[in-house]
Each structure stands twice: as structure tokens, then as C-alpha cells.
Image (spheres, rainbow, N blue to C red):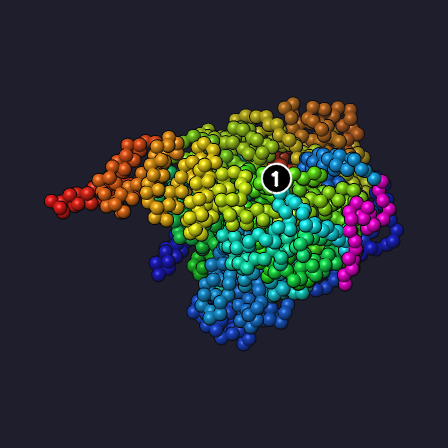
């Protein structure tokens, strides 16, 4: 069905609403039929009708407005120190707040801000110009991605994006794409910014141009978020995605292995404050970033968005520091400075997963030395298993004995290991039986897991012990 | 082979039962029609020459060596590149109409990909099994996957990049696929056919949403340079071609000449006897349904009983279970089935029906669709489902195979049921209903414009839907939802719009029903059901008796804010029915027509409804055991309506007491609502009614002090007897969905024939003083309502009407 205006004049109904006259046409078995003329409040009051519909979900809207007005207040408070009048020209305004330049591309101009960090610059205690000397082989220990094997920081592009939302999907834009890379002995960051959505193709072109020559990208949660999001943006602009086949060193995963157990979460900001000792001066909470950008778009005021540039630049620098930190720790577990025993413990686990038991034992011992009360059990367990794997049985046995002497963390484990040791290694079935029986004594306190296996072992040991007795006799 | 013998046995039982009914005096006197629908021979055709030999041999292996004539017609039309809609009854091989062209095209063009849309997950699963059976025989590998909320995350990536045939539902297309279309680039680039099964399901609000989801899909396909062909299939409705064209927005070829054979079916129409002639009260339809299904169930003839509401399903299941409680073999074999049961329970019941473990099922229209429950032998329709199309769909659940089958329709006292039962010729002769959609319902359209803008920015000059897109985009920009740059409108919210819009109902969260009964061996606080937001108000108020799987529960606490109802098992003898009030405010009048004696207007209104109490009703005897109070937040809705105003002058000329006039108008409203639904061929639930004054300041309603005219806001302020003189009684007929689906302009246009048909219905009703089949029960409308209604309608039509107009009436009484 479609509408055709039947007359040009508007009429007013008794309530004063204007409405237009229309004829309805509709298709009926391929024949166009004309229905009688009707009036319908359509064109004039569409906005009013929309407003009215919009008010239906009043409850939701009120809740939302509360959030938004709260946000408004917070936004305004943020901008308080150097508030400015609304400027006339939007594109030029950003320059008043962010140092940068316009870059020409075949798709138009895009705004870019560049910073160069010369030798001697420290971020989170790490000298940026030393990063190039840090060995890259640890990547094979902390990541299972084989394409990263010949990782080379001089050919790595560090990337972080700021987006209009976290929901993902085609309606989420990356309005600020920051990259960082080493050039000679300096570290350079370049940030591409959408002064408006119409600059997106230009931004993506510039990004592709920038990415040329790099063989790796490094991100934080980029595998799930930044890179797929950029891929979506490239597809939507019908452009080739330069990151499609570049190996992505996503630092989130190694970070989780090392610090996942240590803090409430494994966000970059958490790691910054606990691990990297970075404390940002003027920052914005990430959840506010989309709103700052929408505010910029609507008001054309750059006085708040500059904080997002800062936030993004700090993220990129922290990426580098984080990578350096991880590599140093894995390369020299004994000498690297550590934030706590959990790091040592996690490193030990990383090494033992790679069958590097010597290093693993060292790390576990370090962890044991620094650990807090009550955490020894897990470490001792890992330590003993590493020793067992290394065939350092005497040491392992003494660890198991130590575990049994501990009050806490009662578990079958040390008894079972001792029983195994005496049964298989020493062939001393009587001693093995003694440990099984000891385990049974403490039965009431143990978790029910593993009991059936222990019972089997007990019966087998009884049999073996009996046979051994009979044989010499 | 065993199956055949069982089938032959069932034929004998059905004959015996029918025979018994005809011989029994009290049953046969209630039968208004026995219609024998003869067996139908099939019309056959060969596979067209362009079908690959390998494919033909696969179908031959499955026992299909020839096609039905309509299948060939469909396959040929698709081959020439046209969009088609195939309309044939259940079990006429409609799935072949799309599977054959899809697989043939796949062999021709190995890179091509396909999307199948089914209205429910269960149907998608069924189809998956069927098509895998075909694909497994092919030499070429064709990957078929369902993609829905149950698909595990790790499988999704593979399906996105490799699925040749992706089977999904509109909701998933709406929230999962279109907003992430870049991940589906491979599918959209190579999308050759889109299959939409159960097209008739997409009417009303869901259909209006569906049309917009397809508009969005057209945009996305165009972005990737593809223009998929559509293959739709539909049950019998009046306007399949029109519906398909409105849904997909393009001309469609209709294929409707069924070539499939069908078995013999007997369709019995049964009107429960009048128990109280004065009040025009008939026997309870559920009781009759219970009685008629007993002999069938006793002889293990698989029977489905359709009831009109969830409450009725539970009540009837309980009745039947009670009957068979002593027979362990049958007691467990009777189940209820409705929306709100948990998916696992539903799958278990469906399977039980297929393998014959379940003999009887009592269902809402949830089983009307093509959910695979095998072929049943008897179907009892307890209460008119609201449309002719649904009635045929429900009757079609019995007798898909070649043997005999039985369908029984039992009427309730409502005018619509009575009209159908007393006019079987109308039913058997008429075309079924129209599937109506209004894709440009502003609320629906606005939602999808947001989604579409999220998916791809709108460009200046682009078209989407029938309203002025630029104005809507500007509105959204003002609201901060969009931002215009370089001639394109970009999404500027940290939100995912598709998540906020549910295709199925108003997008408020469902209520969870939590059973807190403490019992050994069962976890406490078990979720037993989900109830949609609107229904929750009438089913989950504190003290309500909630029935689920024919177990009774009583609501102990309703946590409204968190959308949770805590219930406990209940062993009482009653169930509850909600009492609610409705207020209307007129927001805008679009059209007015004045006939002198009456006026009709059409416009937008605000409806406020509130559940204020409930009735306790004893099982079996149905006596009223008392009332309870309820205090729940009210619900508001903006929708479209038409209203009939009876002018002061014409009322005065009748020289009847004012109160009797108001009773008469109440009776008119009752019959008018039924006639409007019949005329518009929509469900009774789609249009609601209210009686008030012209300005919608006073409303007719029941209170403890009796019937009266009360102020809108609360129930205490009563219209004084003096003021009643100035009162111009007005009947509001309004649509149940926010914004309306397009029924009310139709009511406005056809108001005169509607009033004439309403007069005909009331005048020809055999009752003495009014009954539930014409003006409503006398207990509610008063003893003189019928007489006054007839006088009033006769008066206004004679003095104000345009006689020639009555010929436009869709049917005559």
C-alpha cells in the first residue's frame, strides 16, 4: 500500500491539528486499485507522534535520563577548569586543544596527532629506548601462537582504539586509532582522529598507509575487540584490511597467565597501578569515552576530547611497558624485579608447562619465600611435581613431608604421592601402605575426591606386599 | 507395517465414535453440521529437465519419484528468477518446494549460499534434520547449520564463514546477524535464496516487524551486491500474495493449486445445549470437549484438543488427568502444552506425541504451527480460535496421512463462536482471513530505522518504509541517536538497538515464575515458567492461582521490579480470574464523520489498564467463591481507535430511561466488537472495547456499589444523575498493539455496515432478553439491553444512515 497526496491544501481538524488528504493505492493481484480518500494526520505532526511514542516507555526513559543528566554533570565537572565558549568552526577547534595536523589522503583529510619519545624517556619504570634490547624469545613461552615466533619489536605496531561503544557490531565506530612504533632509538605515537564520521575512509586509508612495513601488531584484548572492530570498519568502507594477516601479539593472554590470580581483574588500568607503577595524571574513565566523543560531535568543542587523546597515548605506552615487563621477567626470572609472589608462581607454571623444570623450580622456590600465609599449599604442590618431573626425588619427598606437616590445606595429594613413590620407585610396599593408611586416618577432613583411587591402591598394595613376603620365604 | 494396522484400528474407532454420537440424543441434537471432506487424489508431474540427475536419484531413494503438480510449478517459477509464495495445506510436500531448488542451485553454483527463516527454533531444528537427510546422500558436501540462541560460541564462527544453508529465525536475524553483517559478508555476498516458511505466521505486529527486518536485509544484501530471491510458503489465508508482497516489498508469484492427495476427514460442528433459556447460557465448552475426547482417548486414538487460552489449557488438562488418574497407562499419556513451558518440557512432549507415548495433548494455538508432532487422528477445537485460517490449521493437525480423521469444533457462547456454529456454510464457503501487516506503524518503523542506521548509515535520499525518512532521521538526530555528517546519518549511541526491540511483543522483560515449595529431592526455588510482561499482570498478582502443567500454584509474592513471582504448590479447589479497569484518553482525532443521530471518529488514544482485583472460581461447578483486591502498577499504551458516539438528540427521541440506554449501548459494544473482528477477520484479542462518553472523561464500569459511570482516574468519583442527561454514550473500539496495526481506520471506513451487521446479529438471536451470543450476559448488561440495543441501532441507522451503503457489507445475516 502506498500513499499519494490528493490535494495540496492542508486542513485543520477541530483540535487544531493539521492533516493532509491522501488516496490509498494498493496492489491486488497485479492490478492497481484505488481506495477511497482518507485523511490522516501524517506529515505535519509526525514529529509530535514520534515524541508521543517515545514517551511510552516512560519508566525506562526516566531511568535513562537520570543516568544521562548525571553524566552531563560529570562531563561538565570534567571540563570545568578550562571551559570555553562554543567555537564557530568545528574542524579547526580540535587544534586548539590537541597538537596535530591534517593528513591528506585520496579520500580527503584526517586529523593526526604525533608524539615522539626520545631516548631516556621512562614509562612505568621502563626506559623506552631499552625495549629494543629486550629478548623476544619469551613470546614462545607465554603465547601458543606460532606465527609470533620471530617477533621483532622493531617491526611491531602497537595499537589501541577508542570507540563509540563496547557493544560491538557494525554501528560501533573507532573514532580514535592510536598506533606506536620504534623508529631509530625513539618511540613514536600517531593518533588518527575522526573530527566527523565523514573522515572515516580517510582515516582508514591513513591507517593502512601507516601499517605498511610492519610485520606484527601488539594489542591489549585486540584479538576480541580492536582488530575485529577495525576489520568491520574496513569492510564497511570497502577497503582492504591491513591487519588481516598480521600476527597479533595480544598481551591480555600472557597478562592473564601471570597476574590473573593476583588482582580483581586483568584490565590494563589495574595492571598499570599494581604492576607497572603508572599513575595517570589527568585521565578519563573508559566508560565515559563514548559520551565525551558524542558530546564533541554535537558541540564541536575539543576541550574535553583532548583527555581521550591522552588516555589513548598512555594506553599505547603501557602496552610497550607491559610487553617489556613480561619479557624481562620470563628471560631472567631470578633477577627481574617482581611485584609479588604470584608473579613468581605464575612464571613457574609457565615454565613447567614448557617443560623447563629447572627455571620452574627456581620460580616456585622464590614464590614460596615471599608468599602470604595459607598460600604455600598450591606452591608446594607445583614445586613437588616439578621436582618429581626432574627426578629430584629426595627433594620432592621432603616437600611432601613438609606438606603433611602443614595444618592447612588438607588434601590426599601428598599421601598419594608418597605412596606412589614408595610403591613404584622404592618397591617398598610396606612403607607405601603406611602412607595410604595415614591418609585413611585423616579421611574425615579430606575432600571426597580421589578416595576410590586410593582404595584401589590400598588393595593393590596389600596384594603386592603379601606376594613380596611370600616370594623370599 | 504395525503402523498400518494401528491406523486401520483407529479408522474403526473413529467410525464407532461418530456413530455413537449420531445415535445419542443429547449429542446429536447439538450437532449443527457434519461435513465429510472426501479423500483427494493427487496430481502428479515429472521432475523438470533442469534438475540434476544426482538430485533426482536422491529424492527417488527417499521414495519421491514424481512431484506434485504444485511442486513442479513452484520449482519452475523459481528457476525463472521470480519470488514465489507457495500456499498448500499441511503435509503437501511444501518443504520440497524450497529444498529442491536450493540443492539444485547449489550443484549448479557451488559458491552460492542460502538463508532459511522459521518462526520458531523448534521448526528450524525439524527442518535441519530433514534437509540433512537429503544432503547426506549427495556427493558434494553441503554444510547445513541452525544458527540461533542455542548455537555454541565456538560453532558460530564456522557457521558464519562456511554455512551453505543457514537455518535461523527472524529474531536471530534481527539481533544476531544483521547488526554483525560484516562477519557474515561471505553469506550476504553469495546469498541466492531466502526461504521464509510459515509466512502466514507473520501477521499483525510480528509481521510488521518482519517486513522491517526484511527491509533491513535488502539494504545489507544490496551493500554486498547481492539480490536474493525469496521462496515463501504459507498455510491457507485469504491474501498470501498480498501478505508476501508486503513482507518482502516486491511482486511475488502465487502458487496455490494443490496437487497433493489427502485422506478422508469428518468435520463436526457442535453447539453446547442451552441450559438456561432466559439467560441464554449454554453448556460449558470445556466440559463438552472433555466428554467428547474421553472415548477417543480411552481407545488410544491420538487426539489433540485446542483450547483458547492458557488458563483453559490448564483447566482442561486437569479435568482429563483427573478422569484418567486411576489408569496409569493413560494418565501419564495426557499432557498440556503452551507457551511459557520450558523448552525441554516442550521438546519432550513433542517427541512423546511423535512416538505415540502421549495419547492426548491439550494445547493453545502453540501447536497450530508446523511443529513436528507426527500425524494425529482426531482434533477437538474447544472454542473458535478467532479466525477461519486458524480453525483449518488446527483441524489440519488431525489426518495428515491417508486414513480417516476427525475434527470437532465446539462453540462457546460468544457472538463470534455462535455466528460460526450457526452458519456452517459461511465457514465452509468463505475465504479465510487476511494476513494484515502495517510495516509503517510508527513505533515499529522507528525501532527498525534505528537498527538499520546502526547497521549501515543512512544516506541522504535513501528510502525506508512509507513514512518520511528524512523527518524521522532528523528526529533521531535531535534525540542524539544519530549524527549527520557528509550526507550520511551515523549511529551515535553506546547501545545496541536490536537488543532493545523484541519482535514478538512489547519489549518489556518477561516475568519468571519461581516455585518455592520445599520438597525432598527437588531443588528449592526452581524456575517453572516464564510469563510475558502483559500477561503477568493478569496471571501473577499475589494470591493468583497459577497453573502450569496442570499443577496448581499460588502466587505468594510478586517482585514486580525484578520481574519475579514466587509461587508455592496449592491444593485448593478454585482458580482465579483477574478483574481489570481500562481508561482511555483521546490524544488526537484523525477523521470525523457526523450522521446527525450518531458520529464516528478515528484517532489516537492513550489506554491505561489496571488490574484491580480477582474472582475465585470453583473447579467443575464454576461457582464464584468471592473476590480479592490487587494493587499493581498500571500499564499505559498509545494506540489507534475508532469510536461511535450516540448523539443526545437521538437518545432523547427514544424516550427510555437513561440507564437503560446505557445498558443498551453496553450491549451494542459487546456485539460490535465481535462483528468488527469477524468483518476485519482478525483475532478477538486484537481489538478491545470500552464504553464511556464522547470526551472519554467518564467510563462505564462495575464497582462494589454496582454499575455506574465513573471518572477516569480512579473508581470513586461517580457521574451524578443530573449529569447523565448530558452524557453522550460512546463505544470505543481500540487496537491492542501500541500504534495500531491498521484495523481502526478500517472500522471507521466501514462503520455503517458494521452497525447494520451488529443490529442483524442482535435482532436475529433466538434468546429472549439478551445472551452471551448477542449483547452479552444479562447479569452484566441488564434485562433490557437487547431491546434497547435493537431500538437504538434501528433509530440511528434509519435517521442518519445512507441505505445504499449496506451493500458493501462483507456478508449478510
**Image vertical order of residue B233 relative to residue B578, above or below:** below
Between B102 and A73, the one nearer to me in the picture: A73
Q: Is residue A95 on the magenta stretch? A: yes
Residue located at (65% from left, 65% from top): B226
Residue at horizontal 70 percent and vertical 61 percent from the top: A209
Q: Is residue B326 magenta?
A: no
User: Image point 54% across, 61% down: which residue?
Assistant: B163
The chain to which mark 1 is attached is A
Residue B226 seen in render: yes
Q: Position of residue B307 (x, y in %)?
A: 52, 44
Percent x, y for residue A216?
60, 58
Q: Which residues are magenta?
A: A85-109
Q: Residue furthest right?
A: A9
In the displayed structure image, the side of residue B775 where residue A410 appears, left or right:
left
Decide which of B369, A163 is in the foreground and name it.
A163
Residue, far bottom: B49
Give the percent coordinates (x, y) of residue B477: 77, 47
- Label 1 element class: loop
On the rendered structure, is B315 left or right of B663? left
Q: Which residue is mark 1?
A: A277
Q: Is residue A223 left or right of residue A352?
A: right
Q: Quadrant of the N terminus of chain A?
A: bottom right
* Residue B444, horizontal then vertical, whole percent: 69, 48
Quadrant containing the C terminus of chain A is top left
Of B663 and B89, the residue lying toward us: B89
Amino acid at each position: 500500500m502506498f500513499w499519494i497526496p490528493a490535494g495540496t491544501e492542508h486542513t485543520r481538524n477541530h483540535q487544531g491539528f493539521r492533516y493532509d488528504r491522501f488516496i490509498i493505492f494498493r496492489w491486488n493481484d497485479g492490478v492497481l486499485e484505488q481506495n477511497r480518500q482518507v485523511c490522516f494526520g501524517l506529515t505535519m505532526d509526525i514529529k509530535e507522534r514520534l515524541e508521543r511514542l517515545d514517551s511510552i516507555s516512560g519508566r525506562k526513559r526516566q531511568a535513562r535520563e537520570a543516568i544521562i543528566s548525571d553524566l552531563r554533570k560529570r562531563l561538565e565537572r570534567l571540563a570545568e577548569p578550562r571551559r570555553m565558549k562554543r567555537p564557530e568552526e568545528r574542524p579547526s577547534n580540535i587544534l586548539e586543544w590537541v597538537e596535530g595536523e591534517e593528513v591528506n589522503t585520496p579520500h580527503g583529510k584526517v586529523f593526526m596527532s604525533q608524539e615522539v619519545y626520545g631516548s631516556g624517556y621512562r614509562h612505568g619504570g621502563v626506559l623506552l629506548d631499552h625495549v629494543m634490547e629486550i629478548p623476544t624469545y619469551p613470546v614462545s613461552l607465554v603465547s601458543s601462537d606460532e606465527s609470533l615466533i620471530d617477533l621483532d619489536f622493531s617491526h611491531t605496531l602497537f595499537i589501541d582504539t577508542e570507540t563509540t561503544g563496547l557493544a560491538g557490531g557494525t554501528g560501533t565506530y573507532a573514532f580514535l586509532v592510536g598506533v606506536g612504533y620504534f623508529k631509530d632509538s625513539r618511540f613514536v605515537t600517531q593518533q588518527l582522529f575522526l573530527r566527523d564520521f565523514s573522515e572515516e575512509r580517510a582515516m582508514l586509508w591513513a591507517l593502512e598507509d601507516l601499517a605498511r612495513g610492519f610485520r606484527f601488531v601488539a594489542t591489549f584484548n585486540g584479538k576480541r575487540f580492536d582488530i575485529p572492530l577495525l576489520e568491520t570498519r574496513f569492510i564497511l568502507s570497502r577497503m582492504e584490511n591491513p591487519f588481516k594477516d598480521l600476527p597479533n601479539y595480544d598481551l591480555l593472554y600472557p597478562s592473564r597467565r601471570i597476574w590473573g590470580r593476583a588482582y580483581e581483574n586483568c584490565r590494563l588500568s589495574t595492571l598499570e597501578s599494581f604492576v607497572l607503577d603508572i599513575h595517570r595524571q589527568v585521565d578519563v574513565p573508559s566508560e565515559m569515552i563514548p559520551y565525551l566523543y558524542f558530546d564533541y560531535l554535537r558541540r564541536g568543542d575539543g576541550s574535553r576530547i583532548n583527555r581521550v587523546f591522552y588516555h589513548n597515548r598512555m594506553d599505547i605506552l603501557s602496552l610497550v611497558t607491559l610487553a617489556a615487563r613480561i619479557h624481562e621477567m620470563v628471560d631472567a626470572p631470578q633477577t627481574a624485579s617482581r611485584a609479588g609472589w604470584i608473579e613468581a608462581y605464575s612464571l613457574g607454571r609457565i615454565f613447567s608447562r614448557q617443560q623447563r623444570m629447572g627455571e620452574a623450580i627456581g620460580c616456585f622456590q622464590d614464590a614460596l619465600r615471599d608468599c602470604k600465609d595459607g598460600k604455600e599449599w598450591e606452591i608446594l604442590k607445583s614445586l613437588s611435581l616439578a621436582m618429581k618431573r626432574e627426578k629430584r626425588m629426595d627433594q620432592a619427598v621432603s616437600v611432601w613431608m613438609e606438606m603433611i606437616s602443614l595444618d592447612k590445606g588438607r588434601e590426599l595429594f601428598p599421601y598419594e604421592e608418597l605412596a606412589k613413590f614408595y610403591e613404584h620407585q622404592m618397591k617398598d610396599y610396606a612403607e607405601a601402605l603406611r602412607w595410604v593408611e595415614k591418609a585413611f586416618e585423616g579421611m574425615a577432613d579430606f575432600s571426597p575426591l580421589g578416595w576410590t583411587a586410593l582404595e584401589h591402591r590400598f588393595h593393590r598394595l596389600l596384594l603386592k606386599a603379601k606376594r613380596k613376603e611370600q616370594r623370599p620365604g | 507395517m504395525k503402523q498400518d494396522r494401528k491406523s486401520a484400528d483407529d479408522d474403526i474407532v473413529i467410525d464407532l465414535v461418530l456413530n455413537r454420537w449420531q445415535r445419542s440424543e443429547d449429542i446429536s441434537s447439538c450437532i449443527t453440521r457434519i461435513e465429510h471432506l472426501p479423500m483427494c487424489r493427487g496430481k502428479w508431474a515429472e521432475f523438470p529437465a533442469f534438475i540434476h540427475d544426482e538430485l533426482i536419484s536422491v529424492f527417488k531413494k527417499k521414495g519421491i519419484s514424481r512431484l506434485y503438480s504444485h511442486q513442479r510449478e513452484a520449482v519452475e517459477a523459481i528457476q525463472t528468477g521470480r519470488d514465489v509464495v507457495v500456499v498448500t495445506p499441511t503435509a503437501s510436500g511444501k518443504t520440497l518446494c524450497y529444498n529442491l531448488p536450493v540443492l539444485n542451485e547449489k550443484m549448479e553454483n557451488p559458491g552460492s549460499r542460502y538463508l532459511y527463516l522459521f518462526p520458531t527454533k523448534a521448526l528450524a531444528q525439524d527442518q535441519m534434520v530433514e534437509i540433512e537427510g537429503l544432503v547426506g546422500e549427495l556427493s558434494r558436501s553441503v554444510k547445513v547449520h541452525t544458527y540461533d540462541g542455542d548455537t555454541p560460541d565456538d560453532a558460530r564462527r564456522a557457521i558464519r564463514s562456511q554455512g551453505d544453508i543457514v537455518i535461523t529465525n527472524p529474531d536471530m536475524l534481527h539481533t544476531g546477524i544483521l547488526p554483525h553483517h560484516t562477519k557474515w559478508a561471505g553469506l550476504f555476498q553469495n546469498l541466492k535464496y531466502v526461504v521464509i516458511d510459515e509466512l502466514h505466521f507473520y501477521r499483525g505486529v510480528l509481521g510488521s516487524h518482519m517486513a522491517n527486518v526484511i527491509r533491513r536485509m535488502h539494504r545489507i544484501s544490496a551493500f554486498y551486491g547481492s539480490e536474493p530471491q525469496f521462496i515463501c510458503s504459507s498455510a491457507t489465508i485469504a491474501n498470501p500474495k498480498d501478505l508476501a508482497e508486503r513482507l518482502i516489498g516486491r511482486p511475488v508469484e502465487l502458487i496455490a493449486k494443490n496437487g497433493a492427495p489427502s485422506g478422508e476427514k469428518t468435520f463436526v460442528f457442535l453447539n453446547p445445549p442451552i441450559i438456561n433459556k432466559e439467560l441464554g447460557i449454554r453448556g460449558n465448552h470445556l466440559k463438552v470437549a472433555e466428554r467428547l475426547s474421553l472415548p477417543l482417548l480411552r481407545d488410544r486414538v491420538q487426539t489433540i484438543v485446542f483450547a483458547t487460552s492458557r488458563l483453559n489449557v490448564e483447566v482442561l488438562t486437569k479435568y482429563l488427568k483427573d478422569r484418567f488418574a486411576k489408569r496409569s497407562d493413560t494418565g501419564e499419556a495426557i499432557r498440556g502444552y503452551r507457551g511459557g513451558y520450558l523448552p525441554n518440557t516442550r521438546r519432550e512432549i513433542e517427541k512423546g506425541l511423535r512416538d505415540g507415548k502421549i495419547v492426548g495433548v491439550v494445547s493453545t494455538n502453540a501447536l497450530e504451527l508446523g511443529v513436528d508432532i507426527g500425524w494425529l487422528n482426531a482434533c477437538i477445537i474447544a472454542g473458535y480460535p478467532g479466525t477461519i485460517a486458524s480453525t483449518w490449521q488446527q483441524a489440519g493437525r488431525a489426518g495428515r496421512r491417508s486414513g480417516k480423521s476427525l475434527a470437532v469444533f465446539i462453540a462457546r457462547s460468544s457472538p463470534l463462536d455462535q455466528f460460526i456454529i450457526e452458519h456452517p456454510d459461511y465457514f465452509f464457503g468463505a475465504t479465510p482471513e487476511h494476513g494484515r501487516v502495517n510495516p509503517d506503524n510508527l513505533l515499529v518503523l522507528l525501532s527498525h530505522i534505528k537498527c538499520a542506521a546502526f547497521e549501515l548509515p543512512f544516506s541522504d535520499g535513501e528510502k525506508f518504509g512509507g513514512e518520511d525518512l528524512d523527518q524521522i532521521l532528523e528526529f533521531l538526530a535531535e534525540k542524539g541517536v544519530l549524527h549527520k555528517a557528509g550526507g550520511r546519518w551515523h549511529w551515535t549511541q553506546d547501545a545496541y538497538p536490536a537488543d532493545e526491540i523484541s519482535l514478538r511483543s512489547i519489549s518489556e522483560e518477561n516475568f519468571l515464575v519461581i516455585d518455592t515449595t520445599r520438597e525432598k529431592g527437588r531443588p528449592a526455588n526452581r524456575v517453572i515458567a516464564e510469563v510475558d510482561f502483559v500477561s503477568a499482570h493478569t496471571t501473577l498478582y499475589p494470591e493468583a492461582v497459577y497453573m502450569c502443567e496442570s499443577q496448581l500454584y499460588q502466587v505468594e509474592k510478586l517482585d514486580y521490579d525484578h520481574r519475579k513471582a514466587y509461587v508455592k504448590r496449592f491444593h485448593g479447589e478454585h482458580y482465579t480470574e483477574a478483574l481489570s479497569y481500562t481508561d482511555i484518553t483521546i490524544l488526537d482525532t484523525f477523521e470525523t464523520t457526523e450522521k446527525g443521530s450518531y458520529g464516528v471518529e478515528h484517532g489516537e488514544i492513550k489506554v491505561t489498564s489496571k488490574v484491580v482485583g480477582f474472582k475465585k472460581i470453583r473447579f467443575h461447578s464454576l461457582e464464584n467463591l468471592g473476590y480479592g483486591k490487587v494493587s499493581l502498577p498500571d500499564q499505559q499504551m498509545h494506540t489507534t481507535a475508532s469510536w461511535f458516539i450516540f448523539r443526545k438528540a437521538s437518545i432523547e427521541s427514544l424516550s427510555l430511561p437513561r440507564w437503560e440506554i446505557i445498558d443498551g449501548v453496553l450491549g451494542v459494544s459487546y456485539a460490535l466488537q465481535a462483528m468488527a473482528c469477524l468483518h476485519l477477520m482478525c483475532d478477538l484479542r486484537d481489538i478491545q472495547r470500552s464504553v464511556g462518553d464522547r470526551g472519554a472523561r467518564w467510563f462505564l464500569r462495575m464497582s462494589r456499589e454496582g454499575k455506574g459511570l465513573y471518572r477516569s482516574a480512579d473508581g470513586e468519583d461517580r457521574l451524578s444523575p443530573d449529569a447523565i442527561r448530558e452524557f453522550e454514550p460512546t463505544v470505543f473500539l481500540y487496537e491492542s498493539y501500541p500504534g495500531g496495526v491498521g484495523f481502526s481506520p478500517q472500522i471507521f471506513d466501514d462503520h455503517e455496515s458494521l452497525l447494520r451487521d451488529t443490529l442483524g446479529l442482535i435482532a436475529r438471536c433466538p434468546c429472549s432478553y439478551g445472551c452471551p451470543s448477542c449483547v452479552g450476559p444479562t447479569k452484566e448488561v441488564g434485562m433490557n439491553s437487547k431491546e434497547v440495543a435493537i431500538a437504538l441501532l434501528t433509530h440511528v441507522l434509519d435517521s442518519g444512515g445512507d441505505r445504499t451503503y449496506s451493500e458493501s457489507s462483507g456478508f449478510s445475516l
